[in-house]
Image (cartoon, grey):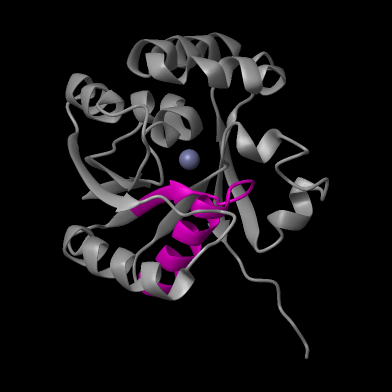
Amino acid sequence: MILFIEPHYDDFILSAGMYSTKKPVDKVITVFKSRSNVGGSRAFCNDLGKDYTELGLPNIDWKNPSLLFETEDLSSALDPLVKNATLILTVLGVGNFAHKFLRDTIIKRYSNIPILFFRDFPHAYDATKLCYIPFEEHSKDFQLVETLGNDTEYITKIDLFKKYYPSQKSLLWFEREQFSTPVQEEIYKFKPTISLW
Ligand SMILES: [Zn+2]
């Protein structure tokens, strides 16, 4: 079973929307609950014929993250769902704290299952979200294994985003620089840098 674990309701379509229409994904899980977007991922998955589950965990307050508590919560909620997975797909965890937290938990907990990471769109393309540190620095423990999609497919993806996530219209405005530049989807695998010390 191929599983996509998205942090929030729109991350599957935004970071892997082109992949999702080309390659198999059996089930999608939304981890954190956000006030807007409710129902978008469920409708998108229903239309694509994929299973869907939402965990409804409280979203991580990036100003005051409480890691210990939420790591246990997240692992115990994910364990039964991940049990039969042959491949886990998730976000690369760059440009958003909740994304990074989910990615780190998945790496630590499910190292026995192959995992692929999708570059977070639009966060990982936004210099302010990267704190003006180059993307390459954020992603140095990961190796790019595949890029996919073209400009036409990108536009189709954004149209799908508008259709399934109408409450997220403000994102199109706040992140307009990222949304107006078609990018391919980038898929990475974990490759920790070797430290001599
Ligand atoms: Zn997100």
**Residue at 62% in and 15% down:** 173
Q: Is residue 78 above or below residue 19?
A: below
**Residue at 76% in and 39% down:** 128
Indicate yes or no whether the magenta region holds residue 34: no
State the residue in front, 33 or 106: 33
Residue 81's spot in the image, x, y percent?
19, 58
Q: Residue furthest bottom?
A: 197
Residue 187's spot in the image, x, y percent?
54, 43
Q: Taking the image as drawn, is residue 158 in sight? A: yes
**Residue at 71% in and 55% down:** 138
Quadrant of the rendered structure where residue 62 is? bottom right
Seen in the image, is 178 located left or right of residue 44?
right
Magenta range: 88-111
State the residue in front, 74 or 121: 74
Quadrant of the rendered structure where residue 48 is? top left
Residue 38's spot in the image, x, y percent?
28, 29
Indicate yes or no whether the magenta region holds residue 91: yes
